[in-house]
Amino acid sequence: MFCTKCGKKTDGDNAFCPYCGQKISASKEGERAAAKKLVFAGIFAVLGITLLAAIFLTKNKDASASDMSEKSRRQYGRMKHSLCF
């Protein structure tokens, strides 16, 4: 563990930093809060990426579907035209 006041490495058994006297147990609470923030940031990042991917894939799918329907209309028109003769 590192002291939050002086930044020096300390043993996990000490209640106070041997270099500056800062209470070590307070840093454990800080580490827990930092870990929670990191977990929440990771969750939001994954959700954001998933949302962006879904939007991107939906837009591309809609574009290809409209292209396909246009292609089908042209083919139908050609078929209809060729059957009339």
Image: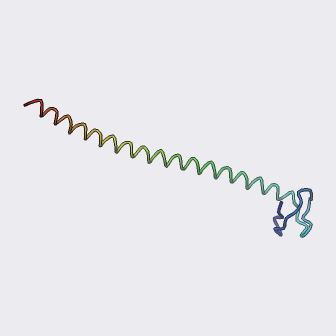
- Residue 63 location in percent, x, y? 34, 45
Q: State which quadrant residue 20 falls in.
A: bottom right
- Residue 36 location in percent, x, y? 71, 51
- Identify the image quadrant of the C terminus: top left
81 and 55: which is toward the camera:
81
- Identify the image quadrant of the N terminus: bottom right
Query: Residue drawn 43% across and 45% down?
Result: 57
For the rendered model, the colour scheme is rainbow
Question: In the rendered picture of this protein, how many numbered marks are placed on residues?
Answer: 0
Q: Is residue 81 left or right of residue 42?
A: left
- Residue 61 location in percent, x, y? 38, 42
Query: Residue drawn 53% across and 46% down?
Result: 50
| 34 over 47 or under it: above or below | below
| 68 over 24 or under it: above or below | above
- Residue 66 location in percent, x, y? 30, 42
Q: State which quadrant residue 84 falls in.
A: top left
| 73 over 44 or under it: above or below | above
